[in-house]
Image: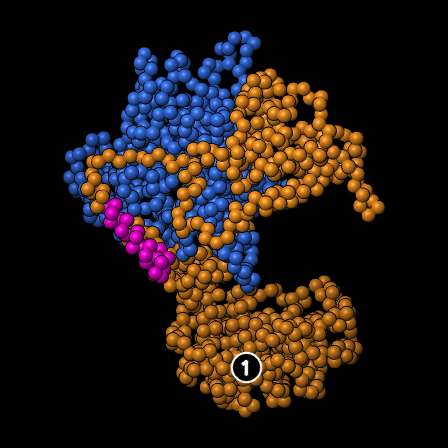
Chain colours: A blue, B orange
Amino acid sequence: MSNEGGLREWKIGPQSEYRFEVDSKRPIAIKVIQGNAEVFGSEMAPGRMYLFSSECKAAIFSWEGCTIQRLDRPHGLPQPNNTSDVPPHVTGKPSTEYLSDETTMTAYANLHLVFEQMRVRSRRAERGATPDLTENTDTMGYEPPRVLVIGPEHSGKTTACKILANYAVRGMAACAPVYINLDPSDGGFTIPGTLTACPIDSPIPTSSPANPLGISATSAPTALSSSKLIPLVHWYGHPDVQKNPRLVEHLIRVLNNNVQERLEDDVLSRTSGLFIDTSANLSSIPLDDKYTLVKTTVLAFRVNMIVVIGNEKLTVEMQKLFSEQSYPDHPVTVLKIPRSPGVADLDAAYKERIQNYQLRNYFYGAPLQLPEELAGQSAGSLKLGGEASMDLTLSPHSTVLSFDDIHIYRIGQESFAPTSALPIGASRILGEMQPVKIDPSQPGARIVGSLLAVSSLVGVPESEEDIVDADVIGFIVITSMDMEAKKMTVLAPVATGLSGRIVLTGSFEWQDV
Amino acid sequence: MSVYNAYPAHGSNASYYSQTHNSQPYQQQYPAYYTAPTTQQQPPALDENSFRSLYTQRLGALTVNSRPIIQDLSMLAQNYPQMAHIVVESIERQVRMMSAPFKLPLFYLLDSIAKNAFHPYAAAFAPRIVRLFLDSYHAVDQPTQHKMREMMATWRSGSPDHRELFGSAVQSEIERVWGTSRMPTSNQVLTELDVVLVQKERAAQQNPYDELLPRHITALHELKRMIPTMNTSDLTATLTRLREMARASVSVVQQPPPGPTNVPNPYASFQAPQLPNYPPPPVANSFPPIPPSGLPAPLPATGFNAQNIISLLSSITSLQPGKLSVDTPVSVEISASMSLEDYEKAILQRKIKVTSTDISRTKPQILPFLYIKDSPQCNECGIRFPAGEDGKVKLRDHLDQHFRQNTKSSENVGRGFSRSWFVGRKNWVSDIPEHSLNKGKRPLAKMSEKQKAEVAEATRKELEAKYIIVPPGEEGKELRCAICMEKISLEFMEEDGDGDWVWKNAVKVDNKIYHATCHHDWANSTFNKQRLLEGEMSRQGTPDTSSRMDTTPLRLKSDSPKTPPSQLLSIAGTKRKAAPSIDTAKPASPSSKEGTPVVRGDDDEPRIKRRAIQV
């Protein structure tokens, strides 16, 4: 922990981690100079500069100990001139940083071993190899691990999935587990409000919460498959599962159908298993009973491992729920692992900012954010590590569409006016999954500023359920409307491909500022 | 406490495994001792004479290596420490009296007593043991000699404080007889190595999570192969190391607390001296020295250097077991050069219990696999690749991509890139990287229509055969399937003259009863639960929302490979058979529309497939 020449050094002990929280406007740069280190299971290349930005809260962990250097302002150096909105006295310094040897990585390493054994067995069964009886037969069957991760809020569910997925792709055998994000409050592969699935075949880096699980495909050149992910995206439209749990339940089934269809042919992913990340609400839904969504997920995806993070009660209830008596044909192992003491509590405001980062990132990419010390240098000269910190600047397109060009729907009941405002005796009973057509020319449609999801459906849908079931190909924002000319301006990632599309609204709004 | 139970693990003695032991009759003979050895009974008071006659009589039964008898006699000795002199006397007399083949079990008994009831027996045996041991040693055949040497080696650390069982003087006197304390022969080293190996293997069984033990064992096996080619100084060094290890590992292995409950149980797998399959004895009849050429042919010498092995041993003995060790593995080499099969084997060999406690507490064993030694690694992003040509090619491609990306992005500064549209469902499910595709068989998907129909038929039959026994008193109750709302038919099922009323084609899930076929369809469908709910809702007031279902155009002819329409229809048809009484008094529920299998079945998978065709 010395500070020389503008570098602050940290010695991370074995099985310890360096935790940090980055300020919004002050990205930091860290380099591993000795030993092996990883960020949430993704190994850091030694000697390379890694950037962390956008209020990133992360940890650099080392199994055997390592030394890292964080860029720091050397003493006595004149203040930089280009301080626009950064206070002059602080640069490149996380708002919080500390070392801790209290981690839960042991549990993840052991879980990974269990899962890897299951994968090996599953692959062998797929190859038709005869099982070797001399080997450890503790871990069950020939099924690959299909893992559901649940737990209370801020227990580190996404981090757990990420670590486990990153470990999975790090073995000697090719592996491509499907990562399924059922947490609509976190964008995961894309923006919030979605339920997504994506096969992962290379480590997911962590550099900014704007793209927590890597970058979905762009037209920019990329080297890593984590920067050109091809997710399957279903639009739910709200950040909170509670808003329309029936729709979530339905989309889980649809998503599963699609995933299963792919896995029929995709042997590598099939034998690699699934990781299902969830929102805390998934296990407390006011449906038939509070575990309805968990049950749906477990049965649909044929989950055989439930990992509960840091909650005894939930663990016991899961064990009861999926006991052998209830599901004799569907063995489910419930494991509890401790919550990492390093998980930061996130307030609602932070979550909202993250959702904003993710929305912005979808349209504009993640331009390189350098600590001030490095300002002005090009990415190429810095020897940056990985690719997550590459300069990914995207240019969305602003297009003018006529009202008839797209068909706007909203799924489920969301009254345009409160029920109390309806005439006496009238009631509005709309199915939670009823697509409702919205006419933008109606006063009250209030869709300016709304984020819309573009359905993959082409042409007139055959039925309403098709609208609900269809996945989406991207998102647009209505930036302005001209009622008289019946035209609207939309911001779209790509210039073409919008006319005739069905688009779905949700409760997200976004100001392009 | 005893090492006997692990003796058969010796490579050369593998034939022991296949031999049955003779303990069974004795179990019956001494039921009181055998079946309830754990109870702490106050031993009945006996005077010296009756004890002597009792003990001698039982000793007479010990003519084979029988665990129960040895246990029995050990316990007896343990329970009467005041009779130590009688026990010692009786055993010595018996050893001297019995002919050569029957001496070994008596020594095992002696060993068991001395180790389990150290006080006062070890001291009582000490003055006589050298003579007794050596006399017997000369009398028995070679395999038995080998056994005796093995046993003797365990005495070196056999006392409760891991010192010589009968004192160092006795130990060195016995050992001196064949010169072990000065110039070790390879046979002696082998014997001692076997003992250490057995200790380690036992320890490994007891502590399956200890990462070090498997390495020690592998190292020992390596060492074993080297011993025949070692020179004297190497042998001496090895022996020293082995003894250190023996001491260390004995102190590490968790010893069960002493007491009658823990009389060693290991003898069972032992046999009487005559061993038909025993390999040619490694020991020549005269000693010392024993020519190494008398050994069973060792594996051909490998590139291992003996000195390396010894330093290896010393390095692992110095590691403290129990302390987390994430060092690069020494003996079980997990490196980039291992084949995929080896990797898989190594993964499967790690032992881990799938419980919350073990997952959180066990020392991680996976680390060598996460940081695979020497694996090709991209120095730009840290990604590792498998070893071998395959990995090299991948790494080269990967670096090419980095290069391309770097040049392109510097060329294209300022030029607009944009987020791509997602590929859409149809492409997502079918665009699979070449290496991920199944090149071999496709069990389900490649079935012909006919086969699929057969499978579907079988599934349906299986489902229909399911039933629930009607709880007593509920025979008159009308039960409706919670999905289709139709009656579940009641039947009387006769079985072996005894009969039960059963609900046919029924399953119980979450305390609700469904038609088995309905539930199966429902579980395999996606939209239905919602439809069902909406249907219920519509009954309550807005029939128009459900009528939209009627406007759904007729399904296109589906070429779905999954669920041929014929199957769906057949399910629908038979379901009616199973539940023939359609309740007509249900006006608000037009059964042709919602909930009935016809619609539900039709609504199944083909809907998704259909879109794939149409898009």
What's drawn in magenta, residue-wise?
B385-406
Residue A490 image-quadrant placement = top left
- Toward the viewer: B318 or A119? A119
Q: Is residue A113 visible?
A: yes
In the picture of the structure, the residue carrying the numbered disc 1 is B171
Q: Quarter of the image holding residue A492?
A: top left
Q: Choose between B584 and A140: the one closer to the eye.
A: B584
B128 is higher (above) or lower (below) than A370? below
Q: Quadrant of the C terminus of chain A?
A: top left
Q: Is residue A510 left or right of residue A76?
A: right
Q: Is residue B396 magenta?
A: yes
- Residue A15 within the segment the image draws in magenta: no
Q: Residue B31: x, y in percent?
A: 77, 68
**Label 1: how many Cα within 10 Å (few below 14, some 14–19, many 20+):** many
Residue furthest to the top:
A424
Q: Quadrant of residue B171?
A: bottom right
Q: Secondary structure at mark 1?
A: helix
Q: Residue at x 72, y 62 (%)?
A: B39
Task: Name the amino acid type tagged 1.
Answer: Gln
Q: Chain of mark 1?
A: B
Q: Position of residue B404 (x, y in %)?
A: 24, 47
Residue at 59% over, 21% down: B537
Asked if one can make out residue B154 in the rendered structure from this viewpoint, the answer is no
As drawn, the residue found furthest toward the right would be B497
Q: Residue furthest bottom?
A: B286
The image shows residue B200 at horizontal and vertical percentages of 52, 69
Would you say B585 lies left or right of A403 here? right
